[in-house]
């Protein structure tokens, strides 16, 4: 198992502390480029739960995301909201989605959220 980048772990820990939800990050993981804003895990779980609750087919999975995280120590995952997978000249989904990425799987990253412009 590769050792996660200490700097990105520190960024995730600061987001988890709840002091800021404004950190935008772009990561490369498994060949995909994902860009968006980080959220504390509890906030991310609550938002996913809300979406599932409103679904006729997936409502029963909502409770899984309401359960508190069961680990201690430094963060092991990044929790993105309003995030997009960058593909060619578009971001998928256009409106942003919810992604959970293992920090140890991040092969490259930069601070900031990439957006496309026609100008």
Image (spheres, helix red, strand yellow):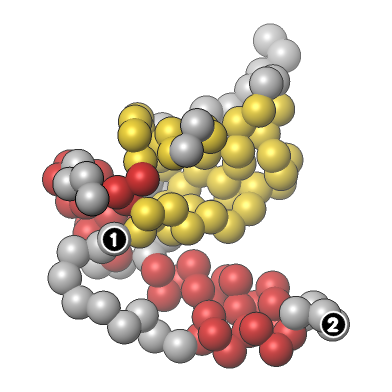
Query: Between 76 and 89, which is closer to the camera in this rendering?
Result: 76
Q: Earlier in the sequence, mark 1 or mark 2?
A: 2
Q: Answer left or right for 24 relative to 1.
A: right
Q: Position of residue 113 (x, y in %)?
A: 48, 34
Q: Residues within 10 Å of mark 2 (few under 14, many from 20)?
A: few
* Residue 25 horizontal/vertical position (percent): 40, 39
Identified at 48% across, 53% down, the residue is 80
Q: Which residue position is annotated with label 2?
A: 56
Q: How many marks?
A: 2
- Residue 95 appears anywhere in the view: yes
Question: In the picture provided, is 9 more to the left or to the right than 31?
Answer: left
List x then y, in percent, for residue 58. 75, 79
Relative to 55, residue 8 above or below: above
Furthest residue toward front: 1
Task: Name the secondary structure under disc 2.
Answer: loop
- Crowding at dot 1, Cα within 10 Å, few <14 / some 14-19 / many 20+, comes out as some
- Quadrant of residue 39 within the rendered picture: bottom left
Residue at coordinates 36% horizontally, 80% vertically from top-left? 69
- Residue holding disc 1: 76
């Amino acid at each position: 198992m590769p050792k996660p980048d200490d700097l990105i772990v520190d960024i995730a820990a600061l987001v988890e502390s709840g002091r800021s939800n404004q950190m935008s990050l772009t990561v490369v993981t498994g060949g995909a480029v994902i860009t968006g804003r980080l959220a504390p895990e509890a906030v991310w779980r609550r938002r996913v739960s809300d979406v599932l609750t409103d679904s006729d087919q997936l409502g029963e999975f909502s409770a899984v995301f309401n359960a508190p995280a069961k680990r201690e120590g430094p963060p092991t995952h990044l929790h993105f909201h309003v995030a997009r997978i960058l593909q060619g000249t578009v971001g998928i989904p256009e409106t942003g989605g919810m992604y959970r990425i293992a920090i140890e799987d991040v092969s490259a990253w930069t601070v900031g959220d990439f957006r496309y412009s026609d100008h």
